[in-house]
Image (tube, coloured by chain):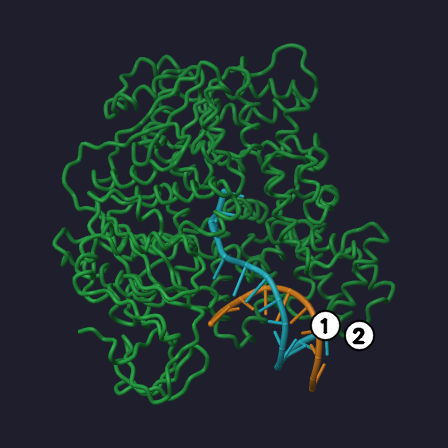
Chain colours: A green, B cyan, C orange
Amino acid sequence: MNKLFPSGAENSRLIAMSSFDEMDAFEGASLSARAMAARPMPYLDGLNPAQREAVETLDGPVLMLAGAGTGKTKALTTRIVHLLSTGKARTNEILAVTFTNKAAREMKERVGRMLGQPAEGMPWLGTFHSICVKLLRRHAELVGLKSNFTILDTDDQIRLLKQLIKAEGIDDKRWPARMLANIIDDWKNRALTPEKVPASDASAYNYRGTEFYAQYQARLKALNAVDFGDLLLHVVEIFQTNPDLLAQYHRWFRFILVDEYQDTNVAQYLWLRLLAAGHKNICCVGDDDQSIYGWRGAEVGNILRFEKDFSGAKVIRLEQNYRSTAHILAAASGVIRGNEGRLGKELWTEAEGGEKLRLIGHWDGEEEARWIGEEIEATQRGTRGQRPIGLNEMAILVRASHQMRAFEDRFLTIGLPYRVIGGPRFYERLEIRDAMAYFRQVISPDDDLAFERIVNTPKRGLGDKAQQTLQTVARANGVSLVDGARLALDEGLIKGKGGTALRRLVDDLARWGRLAGDGDLSHMELAEIILDESGYTTMWQNDKNPDSPGRLENLKELVKALENFENLQGFLEHVSLVMDNDKQDAEQKVSIMTLHAAKGLEFPAVFLPGWEDGLFPSQRSMDESGLKGLEEERRLAYVGITRAEELCTISFAGNRRVFGQWQSQLPSRFVDELPEEHVEVLTPPGLYGGGYGAAAPRAGFEEAPIRSTIEERMAQADGYNSPGWKRMQARAGERGMSQPKESRTQIIDLTATSSFTLGERVFHQKFGYGVIAGIEGDKLEVDFEKAGLKKVVARFVTARDDIPF
DNA sequence: AAAAATTCAGTTTTT
DNA sequence: CTGAATTTTT
């Protein structure tokens, strides 16, 4: 045990720290090395050769390139077990870092299961952020913080910045705080402190970005607070400026494991490099083809450079896939092949058979949702001719969250149970954040941001002016806002209704603080008291909005969640780091989530809607990051396809509502990259080929309406490589959209004004035949024979005699 | 100071 | 088209 601690003359800080560390040291070490080594190693049996190599290569740097579904987690957890079993390391000597809490939890569980004992003794298995919090609490004073610092979330961050911006008299309309927050985040991701921001970034935020960054950091320090980026950055700084302390950790963490290495940003990379500098026993696991977080600072370069960074690194490829059919793998490979500069990896499988991927185009987003809904029901029943698949085993993966809406709408109307993963998070809801601000204020009275949030919530008659007074008094006396409030009250600066209410709040806060200190009450009781006596609960009870009852429910849930924690502090810490809330309900539901949220998951049946240029690949990615952006989008496509085990259905729509405005869409370029021989094109009769709803060009009769012949339609129907398809793809280049176009996906002139006339007989795909009763720009009022009077968008309607059949 | 009206910007993706 | 945020009205 003693060898873990520095012997002889170390400076006092290290000694002090050692005693701090002892708890961890004794916690984990249980089985003696010899006892473990003598045991057989049955856990190695189920591994394929590559996995086995990854598990057994314990010393020196290892890069495990693990493709999707190749048993990465298995290899990683087995490696930990192997380290422990061979006596190479004890539980507390392994630093294992993940990105998500979910991944950390899963790893803990699996290690525990394999060891046949709870893995509680892995104190250093966690996310980058949670491990950094642990480290930073120990050494906070080295960066001028107190160890009870608060962790701000994005919301607090922006409010803080807004204050700074306002104070400088800048129009935060032109220069939003949001933008500044993103800039600062980006700098922090790149491990740049205000002094280190390069000159090339000087123009950021109207040439005042660095200035504000420095101000912001100073303000954080004054508030004894850190934001997310700081967690990494402060720890890096501590290590850089305290080599002896770092050396201590080198001895401490004898083996380092990193999950999802392709997602690390510069700060995380530096952090790892510092920690691994001694022994170089670092094993990074990742897949360059699944790097999809470039936009938030992840550097694919980190994984591409690994061999250079760690000389003598062993690179092990896991390529045997245990998840998907050969068709799915081939399709995924076909798409990802389009990327340059890959480390190179080809997934293969022993599995045989399986269905091809399915590709289908739809008229618009709503029809896509409708079709997928029906398809899900058919798949569930097994009507489609293969085994019935439960709703839990199906997922819809979208590029952007706003796409979810169409599915939710549709599924609600047909009563198909669904769950949205990664939607608005529980702890981000207004009422939860308010409640937590109360808790924060009670626990740490100096938390001015919390005070600002609660001072007039519920309404206490303390408006802008009163709050301004508080700020002034607090600042003039150099005290926190609560204390400032006390002073202001004593001075009689705030009178009347607001004064009374403020006095009451201040007294309440003090009282709750004492209750918290006494420890006579459970923290759950205390929480309830705070919420009730502050009038916060009452506020929602009196609110007549339809969502108020839900909010009250959430507050109840919040209090219930407290059960699992020792005290309020512990809870608040948990919340700031663990923002997940996948409450597992037992019901069978289809999952709807973004492609990003789907990474690491798998489903027997996967639907990938919205494969349209501009949506996926997203226009924004391509505008902002050009080819790099496109490649990341392509990796996203790869991630999407490889989530599927048996059935993968890709779809696109010809028309979609964007910003409330109808837009025509072209199929994604990724559609073209799907290898033909692994794809089956589904073509609902009558959808393609200028039939329904094809508003034949009517602006100006000079242009003869282009209409596909029946032969052409039939040719088109058997594949997306048909001439019609190719022609449409060729037209993708002309982004002008000025002249009417015809194609199987109904490219329609958006700029042409409607040329329908009153009284004209028309046809609408959903409502049938009708007569035009009114015209408003591109909107028509149509009196339908069956459906009655409706307003419809002109291009949904075609003249009666356009109907071909 | 609170409610109502009006404008405005935004849709990736998140530890 | 929606929700947030700002401005105007009460």
Query: Label 2 sits on what residue type?
Result: Gly
Q: Residues within 10 Å of mark 1 (few under 14, many from 20)?
A: some
* Residue at horizontal 83 percent and vertical 62 percent from the top: A488
- In the rendered image, residue A222, in percent from the top left (x then y), is placed at 75, 44
Give the quadrant of the C terminus of chain A: bottom left
- In the visual, does A78 lie left or right of A447? left
* Residue at horizontal 57 percent and vertical 45 percent from the top: A573
Which quarter of the picture shows residue A8?
top right
Mark 2–mark 1 contact, CB under 8 Å?
A: yes
Query: Label 1 sits on what residue type?
Result: Gly
- In the rendered image, residue A329, in percent from the top left (x then y), is placed at 25, 38
Q: Which residue is mark 2?
A: A496
Q: Which residue is mark 1?
A: A461
Give the distance between the C-alpha atoms of the residues marked 2 and 1, in whole angstroms: 9 Å
Is A73 rendered above or below residue A442? above
Front residue of this view, candidates A627 and A534: A627
